[in-house]
Amino acid sequence: MAQDTAEANRSRPDGLPLREADNIDEMYLTFALGSEEYGVNIVGVTEIVGMQRIMSVPDVPNYIKGVINLRGKVIPLMDVRLRFGMPERAYDERTVVIVMDVGEAPIGLIVDGVSEVLEIPPSQVDRHTQFGRAASRPVIAGIGRIGDRVAVLLDTAVLVSESDVSLPAEMAAA
Amino acid sequence: MSAATETSPADGGLMRVSSDKISRLMDLVGELSLSVSETVQSSDLAGLQLTNFDAAVHRLNMIVREVQDAATELRLVPVDDVFRRLRRMIRELERQTGKQIEMEIEGGDTAIDKLVADRLYDPLLHVVRNSADHGLEGPEERTAAGKPAQGRITLSAAQVGSEVRITVADDGRGLSRDKILKKAREKGFFGMDEEPEPAALWKMIFEPGFSTAETVSNLSGRGVGMDVLNATMQALRGRIGVDSTAGQGTRVALHIPVSLAFLDCIILRLGHQLFAVPIDVISEIAKPRPEERVGISADSGSEMFRLRGTFIPVCRLDDFYDTPMRAAETAPEPVLVVFNTTSGPIAVPVDEILDRQQVVMKPLVGRLAHVRASWGCALLGTGEVALVLDCERLAAGAANGAPQ
């Protein structure tokens, strides 16, 4: 049974339809930033594409690297490392863009590489409220535990918003 | 458009088509034109001697342009559809205000994109209500001023280039300079001693929440209608102009592009950044000699371009956006493009003029929504993306000492 689930998980990033029994709200696409594992809910994810030619756009913060033309759609790209104040890293063949629709607007997240789609039920998510300043909604929705691994689950609405989301210093050092 | 009017007699030459189908066609035509450009500009063709191919490409481009025009025309409707709805409102306004109003319509056959027409009614209604409510005087006041007792509101439309100009003119009391100036100073738009130009002052009445009506009437004066007007004009890439003469009336002009689908643009390059500028904004493209670019150190290094005896302020896009676009220490840009705006001409330095293209515009949404002085992104035939400059806001922003 355990092997069964693992296999199903592996196949999902390839675009195979989800099983009906799966609760899509509990499914997360995990990706790497440095040595850390992060996750976003797959509800907003529309596709995952390789790095494309980026065309720069003026008047945007440094973590918005520019736009790509994805089959006639103009999609702004956010470098998630820069968004979190982590050191910049040259893009390589593992670098991918997670294209999402957040609040009806498209956005592409540049990450070091995608890992897999995981089902993380709420019982395995620690909702830490101490991340971020108390005044604003935190960018970290919770910490998901999958066996002995850990994924930092992000609130995409906050991630793509304009608010300052610098991570606590010890995490940004990664 | 002309074909539609020719067949309009009741000969069954008209057919009803859902606007969804036309929108789908427009999208496809947009994609077709992009993909034709992509094909003919393919890097695989570089360096080949293609005499016959080039002739075929020329023909293909002509046909694509005609298909674009024909598709655009499918969606054009006479602006009279909107005007007639407003005429019906006049009776209601007469009843509510107790004023006698005559409405005159000129240029009702001017063609306009159905999508624009559908969104024009609310903002125009607001302008007409304002005229009826605040502009026109009551019958007694009018007679005392030597005017006919019946007030007149003239709605007119005309196409000028790729723009449709719709004006709402009344023969009422005109705007009160004192009242508006007092209010504008209170709200901090002007200094206490500042005496703004009339055009700049009249524009204040379109600022959100700016209403000088002492009492809020049933019709207008809540300042909400102005927000609707501003939002609609921004969405339609339009401009508002106001002119008023005390005692003689007020004239509000809305300048709106005929079609929202395609935009006839010149593509400019500054460093690695591409910009698209609607062609009717460009008044001149010049290659200035060094002595024609005059630096003014006393004004924090601003620059003027001397063109046939007049001086035109130079607006640098990299300064405006506070974003470096070219390598430092390179030679000055070889080309200056002069844009005509309501705030006067501005000269914008660029490295290169690339092309003239009918571009497909994509609105700026999400993280791009706050890019200043831009209408949207333009997808070019090469697959590249250019920022479409809103030269009005660029000129206004540059005059206000942008960046913020």
Image (tube, coloured by chain):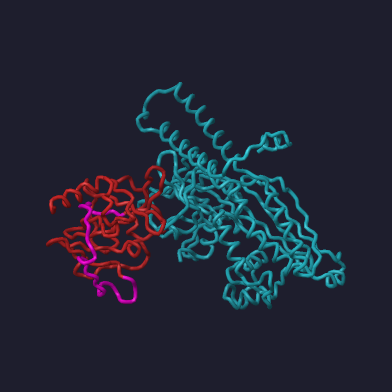
Chain colours: A red, B cyan
Q: Count of labels shown?
A: 0
Q: Is residue B258 magenta?
A: no
Whether residue A140 is visible here, answered yes or no, is no
Report the front residue among A103 and B70.
A103
The image shows residue B145, relative to residue B275, as above or below, that is below
Q: Residue at x 13, y 52 (%)?
A: A1
Q: Quadrant of the N terminus of chain B?
A: top right
Residue B285 in which image quadrant: top right
Left or right: residue B30 versus residue A55 is: right
Residue A32: x %, y % from top left = 20, 56
Give the magenta range.
A109-137
Q: Is residue A129 magenta?
A: yes
Report the front residue among B62 and B269.
B62
Whether residue B218 is visible here, answered yes or no, is yes
Residue B57: x %, y % from top left = 47, 28
Residue A119: x %, y % from top left = 22, 57
The image shows residue B68, relative to residue A56, as above or below, that is above
Report the front residue among B152 and B83.
B83
Left or right: residue A57 versus residue A84 is: right
Q: Residue at x 53, y 52 (%)?
A: B347
Report the front residue among B299 and B144.
B144
Q: Residue at x 46, y 25 (%)?
A: B54
Residue B2 in which image quadrant: top right
Q: Residue at x 60, y 47 (%)?
A: B114
Residue A54: x %, y % from top left = 34, 48
